[in-house]
Image (cartoon, rainbow, N blue to C red):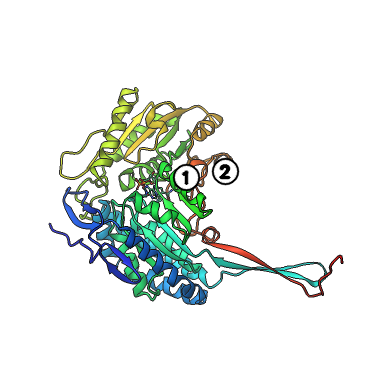
Amino acid sequence: MTYDAQPKASHFIAGKYVEDSAGDPLDVVYAATGETIARLHAATPAIVDRALASAKAAQAGWAAMSGTERGRVLRRAADILRERNRELSVLETLDTGKPLSETLVADATSGADALEYFGGLAGSLTGEHVQLAGGDFVYTMRKPLGVCVGIGAWNYPTQIACWKAAPALACGNAMVFKPSEMTPLCTLKVAEILMEAGAPAGVFNVVQGYGPVGAALTTDPRVAKVSLTGSVPTGRKVYAAAAEGIKHVTMELGGKSPILVFDDADVEAAVSGAIVGNFYSSGQICSNGTRVFVQKGIKEAFLARLTERLADAVIGDPMDEATTYGPMVSERQLKIVEGYIAKGIEEGARLVAGGRRIDRPGWYLEPTVFADVTDGMTIAREEIFGPVMSVLDFADEADGIARANATEFGLAAGVFTKDLARAHRVVGQLEAGSLYINAYNLTPVEAPFGGVKASGVGRENSKEAIHHYSEVRSVYVAVNAPEAPY
Ligand SMILES: NC(=O)c1ccc[n+]([C@@H]2O[C@H](COP(=O)([O-])OP(=O)(O)OC[C@H]3O[C@@H](n4cnc5c(N)ncnc54)[C@H](O)[C@@H]3O)[C@@H](O)[C@H]2O)c1
Ligand SMILES: O=CCc1c[nH]cn1
């Protein structure tokens, strides 16, 4: 099968595709076959400069439009994403290797939700009136930050671009977005669609590249804010570089999230939560609940049902809609995960499912489950970012909470129990940004998403995101003549 994945050019600047073949080559390899399906080029310094200049030039005019007009553009873009969902989902599958059965429901559709939601909010972004003594008052104005930079990870290229662009543009900012070097294709389509929907040229630009391009964008004095989705080590670098310029940041980083399954949980629901929380997108989701703490009384039933249901995963061609489990994004990522599996075995965890590379072209790794994992093992401490679930025993509520929190990360956490009083008591003590009761890994645009501790700073989605793409100014108005001491 041949796929037409080659874009018109590598970058999208000031409303047009732009190429500069002097940049380092950036090949797109289809994860399901290992074939190179497109060649792009990383941005040269001249391209980075052009993109930032274009965003800077466009931003003031975009901010001067009414929120209702900006919102209309975003909502039109949402409609186009939905109309082209199939075409965009195929491209997302080519970019990432995720099965079409997932991309049809979780990528362009999630991007469209963000554009629609923030498009709806754009017209109602207002300040406040604050009455003071004696008739004086203060009013506040909510202002855009200016030029924002978005830097993406490779697991959800369309979603990540839209989750950043939608609130940024709703508030009147312009954006330069650098997708992950692993998945450069989808964001170009988002840029094309925003222009088609009526966004002025320069309001959303895309430049490709590796880490140094992201670093050049982060440190440029024209940039007011950097929003990164990536690993904690990259987050530390980008946060530090942004701090040098006193820039705003959003850091959407990694995790090692816990799921607590109590004795009284519905086994079927808990197994479903653990499956979506570990194997959706072949385990390449930041918020995955990769430490599954299972109370002793339910452990055998949980493991038995989990292994039974894993046997029903349809592993195959991601373009076949019957496939429910696809390849990992790259051979490099697959080898990193194989290294963790070897470490798990070496450190004494019990392999109860999977563990091997699948004998077919592309980067396929079996959904893998380890039981009898202990807190000190490498697979229980480090983010693997692949299809590896660690099942740990726990004694009681206090033990489960303490051990769930014993990590530098704090992105998500889940609790499965029929005792709702306990569920609320437990989530109230778990150190994570997204908490789930009898559910896992759902990310509706209406709910804030983001981490605590090393998992991040700031929130995407919901009204919370508005605070991270705008700032408040206050105006003091005197109605009486001012007094002075002399
Ligand atoms: N919290 C979230 O919302 C979220 C979502 C998806 C992925 N992630 C995390 O992302 C990681 C996997 O993605 P990845 O491997 O692409 O992450 P990564 O940290 O390797 O790269 C992320 C992005 O940062 C860029 N980058 C690298 N060095 C940079 C630098 N010095 N300055 C600026 N940009 C730089 C990369 O080119 C890429 O675009 C995992 O840790 C995962 O948990 C988090
Ligand atoms: O990968 C992190 C963000 C996310 C979680 N679920 C879907 N996307």
Side of 325 where 36 appears, left or right = left
Q: Is residue 96 left or right of residue 135?
A: left
Extreme residue in the right direction: 486
- Residues 55 and 436: in front is 55
Residue for badge 1: 438
Q: Which mark is residue 424?
A: 2
Looking at the rendered structure, the secondary structure element under dot 2 is helix
Q: Residue at x 50, y 72 (%)?
A: 63
Asked whether 408 or 1 is in front, the reply is 408
Residue 474 figure quarter: bottom right
The residue lying toward the viewer, choosing from 235 and 382, is 235
> How many residues crowd mark 1 within 10 Å: few (<14), some (14–19), many (20+)?
many
Of all residues shown, which one is farthest toward the left? Answer: 1
Residue plotted at (34% across, 23% down): 347
Q: Quadrant of residue 481?
A: bottom right
- Whether 69 is drawn above or below 427: the answer is below
Residue 290 percent coordinates (x, y): 39, 38
- Give coordinates of residue 307: x percent, y percent: 30, 35
Front one among 4 and 54: 54
Q: Residue at x 43, y 52 (%)?
A: 228
Would you say the residues marked 2 and 1 are in contact, meaning their CB atoms lie under 8 Å apart? no
Residue 268 disc label? none
Q: Position of residue 81 (x, y in %)?
A: 34, 67
SS for dot 1:
loop
Report, in whole angstroms, how far the alpha carbon at label 2 lies from the one at label 1: 11 Å
Is tag 2's residue or tag 1's residue first in the polypeptide sequence? Answer: 2
